[in-house]
Image (spheres, rainbow, N blue to C red):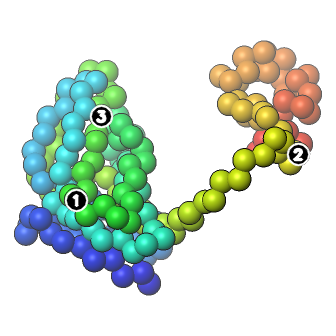
């Protein structure tokens, strides 16, 4: 188990904790009340500061319940906390609901924090990259949903061919 030093900037704020054994994310709360109108965003304090060990980063990720039930998510998902950062953890929320105001109260859970090991990379420039099965196929290249390839929905996956759909093209 990784030990991370944490400082409470607000004495009422609970330490980050896992809701269930085996969970990846710890709950973060806000220290202030806020009302978010449709389309509005805000930067909320959590009342916590961390000292992550070198070689680790923490990622602030949305809470699925806020997203599913209220349209609230993070503007910069995930928010990245580097090992050298010692300031307050903050959460940048946005209300995507087109009609409803969302009210959050002090100590409401607003996000989750996932801590992961991260690697430092030494970049080596080259004139050519090694071949790979996927190649240069980018956004939507593996198919999978009719919204990405409307013609696929009209004629069905068999008519599109293996280059656009299926495991050979990197699809799932």
Is residue 132 in view? no
- Mark 3 or 2: the one toward you: 2
Q: Which residue lies at the image location 36% right of the left edge and 82% below the top edge? A: 3
Spot occupied by residue 76 in the image (x, y as percentages of width and height): 39, 40
Q: Which residue is mark 1?
A: 87
Nearest the viewer among 80 and 108 is 80
Whether residue 25 sits left or right of residue 121 in the image: it is: left
Along the polypeptide, which appears first: circle 3 or circle 2?
A: 3
- Determine the CA span between mark 1 and mark 3: 22 Å
**The quarter of the displayed image where residue 147 is located:** top right
**The quarter of the displayed image where residue 18 is located:** bottom left
Q: Would you call the spot at circle 2 few (<14 residues within 10 Å), some (14-19), or many (20 or more)?
A: few
Q: Which residue is mark 3?
A: 94
Which quadrant of the figure contains the C terminus? top right
The numbered dot on residue 131 is 2
- Determine the CA span between mark 3 and mark 2: 40 Å
Spot occupied by residue 84 in the image (x, y as percentages of width and height): 34, 64
Along the polypeptide, which appears first: circle 1 or circle 3?
A: 1
- Determine the CA span between mark 2 and mark 1: 43 Å
Label 1's element?
Answer: loop
Q: Which residue lies at the image location 68% right of the left edge and 30% below the top edge? A: 139
Label 2's element?
Answer: loop
- Mark 1 or 3: the one toward you: 1
Spot occupied by residue 78 in the image (x, y as percentages of width and height): 43, 48
Spot occupied by residue 73 in the image (x, y as percentages of width and height): 35, 40
The numbered dot on residue 55 is none
Q: Would you call the spot at circle 1 few (<14 residues within 10 Å), some (14-19), or many (20 or more)?
A: some
Whether residue 91 sits left or right of residue 11 in the image: it is: right
């Amino acid at each position: 188990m990784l030990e991370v030093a944490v400082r409470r900037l607000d004495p009422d704020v609970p330490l980050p904790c896992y809701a269930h054994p085996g969970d990846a994310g710890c709950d973060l709360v806000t220290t202030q009340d806020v009302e978010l109108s449709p389309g509005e965003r805000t930067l909320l304090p959590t009342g916590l500061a961390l000292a992550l060990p070198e070689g680790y980063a923490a990622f602030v990720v949305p809470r699925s319940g806020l997203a599913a039930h209220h349209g609230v998510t993070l503007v910069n998902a995930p928010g990245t906390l580097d090992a050298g950062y010692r300031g307050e953890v903050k959460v940048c929320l946005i209300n995507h609901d087109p009609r409803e105001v969302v009210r959050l109260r002090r100590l409401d859970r607003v996000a989750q924090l996932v801590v992961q090991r991260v690697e430092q990379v030494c970049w080596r420039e080259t004139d050519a990259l090694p071949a790979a099965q996927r190649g240069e196929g980018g956004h939507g290249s593996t198919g999978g949903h009719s919204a990405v390839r409307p013609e696929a929905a009209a004629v069905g996956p068999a008519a599109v061919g293996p280059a656009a759909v299926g495991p050979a093209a990197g699809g799932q």
